Amino acid sequence: MTHTRLDLYHDIATGQARRSFRNAQIAMVSGFVMLIVFVAVALNASTTAGSVVAGGLGAVSAALAGFVSRTFVKSQEAAAAHLRAYFDQPLEFSRYLAAERLVVDAGLSTEQRTEVLTALVQAMVTIPAATPAQGPALGQTQP
């Protein structure tokens, strides 16, 4: 049942990333086309006021398309971060299991074992710091 839920989560995250990337591309292309159309209208306008209005509308439509596409790109980046966390989780879990096996086989005293297990549990519940290549860790924001 857990494997089925993980597969569903993976499908949802990849679908969201794919849709966000496609929508961002559509918004970018739409903004560029609208800019070209308004530039053509401004160049063919019979009055200066018409040219200024068409040029202004073109700039506003391009800015709006840029904002919308940026929003979709951020959504795609969030989905990619969730996928990265999804694939990192088994590696983290295997590290914790290996640490547990080492503690069991080390023949430590009760005090030493308690100390090591406390450090291990603290490491498990602490959110890892993000590396520059990964960006911020999930749930954290950049300053």
Image: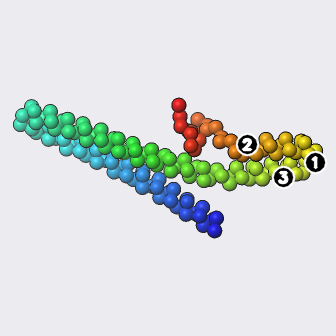
Q: Is residue 5 above or below residue 18?
A: below
Q: Which of the 4 image quarters holds residue 53?
A: top left
Going from N to C along the chain, the mark reached first, 1 or 3, is 3
Judging depth in this view, the residue of 65 and 113 nearest the camera is: 113
Image x and y of residue 107, in percent: 93, 48
Residue sitting farthest toward the left:
46
Q: Look at the numbered discs 2 and 1 and tell me whether their residues touch, using CB distance below 8 Å.
A: no
Q: Residue at x 19, y 44 (%)?
A: 37
Query: Which amino acid type corresponds to the residue marked 2 in the rendered image?
Result: Ala
Determine which residue is flagged by label 3: 101
Going from N to C along the chain, the mark reached first, 3 or 2, is 3
Determine which residue is flagged by label 2: 123
Q: Residue at x 82, y 45 (%)?
A: 117
Residue 39 appears in the rendering: no
Disc 1 to disc 3, C-alpha distance: 11 Å
| Mark 1, other Cα within 10 Å: few <14 / some 14–19 / many ≥20 | few
Judging depth in this view, the residue of 123 and 25 nearest the camera is: 123
Residue 102 appears in the rendering: yes
Secondary structure of the residue carrying numbered label 3: helix
Q: Residue at x 9, y 31 (%)?
A: 48
Image x and y of residue 113, in percent: 88, 45
Query: Which amino acid type corresponds to the residue marked 1 in the rendered image?
Result: Gly
Q: Which of the 4 image quarters holds residue 69?
A: top left
Query: Which amino acid type corresponds to the residue marked 3 in the rendered image?
Result: Arg
Determine which residue is flagged by label 1: 107
Q: Name the quadrant of the N terminus.
A: bottom right
- On the picture, is 50 further left or further right than 75? left
Disc 3 to disc 2, C-alpha distance: 16 Å
Image x and y of residue 120, in percent: 78, 44
